[in-house]
Image (cartoon, rainbow, N blue to C red):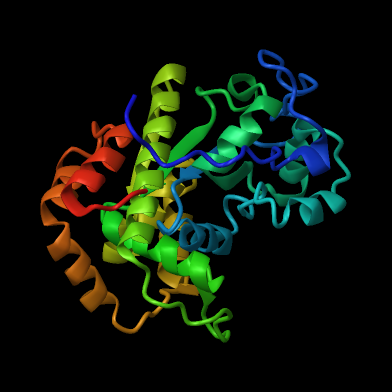
Amino acid sequence: MTALAKPRAAPANLYTPVFGEPPAPGQAGDGRVPDWDALGIAVPYVVFMTGRCGSTWLMHLLRDTSMCGTPHEFFNEGGIASWNRRIGAASVGAYVEGLARRYGSSGRFGFEIDVWRFFQLNPYLDFNRSFPSGRTVFLWMTRRDILAQAYSFATAKASGRWHVFRGTNPEGASPDAPADVAIWQEIHRLLLRERRMTAFFAAQDLRVHSIAYEDLVADRRMVLLRVLDLLGCPLDAALAAAETGEDRTERNAHAGKHTLLAGFAHRHRALLERVMAERDNFDPDTLAPLLRTSAGIVL
């Protein structure tokens, strides 16, 4: 058995405080699934994401079009109780229906959810019936630069500053430079979550449309137009919305970031290049022993 970081004690399911204990394996909540036709939703959509990959940026762009509902991270444990106070749902199935009624528009409703939260949520849902593949649009947001993504996670966790919105003062402390082990821990988590999510897609035979953070940086209007087209929005209206939309998020700025990342990459060049080259097939279980051997780092 390969040596790995010691597993932490499993936390209670994120959704237990709101929806009770998860159902037993093989049972999907109360069996309630959204009646999309009755809800007036022609196209439901789910944006799966790994975090620090531009998903909040995309949600703002989509909301500003007024053509595809008002997507949010409705299943974030920090806000779910507040969202549900407006709905009063006793089950996840009823919660999804209530969200669609309140936050769907123009025949579309969607939300973003990260990998970890999705697998906490999934026991409560009959996912295939709730989000049928012939009707639902599935997006998969990642970030090609795994080093920058891991750094972004490490600094956000240290500072508590996850997003910077235009016209507001950033909150949270300025973080200390993360240690190499903190960055490798985030790389390890990202590899684990990517592997788990893509395995789910394959097992469920889901057609997913991939978007990378770097695509948004290069041309966010073309990304927005692509997503609106996938959601069946009229082209003329989509073009007009893409031209008038504004960015509402800004990048977190960290002094010395490039010096730190260049040094990290130099120290770990061989292993980092291997991870990047083999990313789709890299076994996360091998990372801990490789790090211990190459750099004396224990995850």
Residue 46, given in percent of the width and then of the height, sits at: 54, 40
Residue 183, given in percent of the width and then of the height, sits at: 34, 59
Q: Which residue is nearer to you in this view: 194 or 6?
A: 6
**Is 212 situated above or below 221?**
above
Q: Which residue is nearer to you in this view: 98 or 48?
A: 48
At 35% from the left edge and 64% from the top edge, which residue is drawn? 151
**Is 256 situated above or below 137?**
below
Residue 87, given in percent of the width and then of the height, sits at: 85, 47
Residue 25, given in percent of the width and then of the height, sits at: 67, 16
Residue 40 found in image quarter: top right
Q: For residue 223, say whether it is visible.
A: yes
At 39% from the left edge and 21% from the top edge, which residue is drawn? 202
At 54% from the left edge and 63% from the top edge, which residue is drawn? 60
Task: Say whether residue 73 is left or right of residue 281.
Answer: right
Task: Say whether residue 48 is left or right of residue 172.
Answer: left
Q: Which residue is nearer to you in this view: 129 or 239?
A: 129
Q: Which residue is nearer to you in this view: 276 or 285?
A: 285
Residue placed furthest toward the top? 26
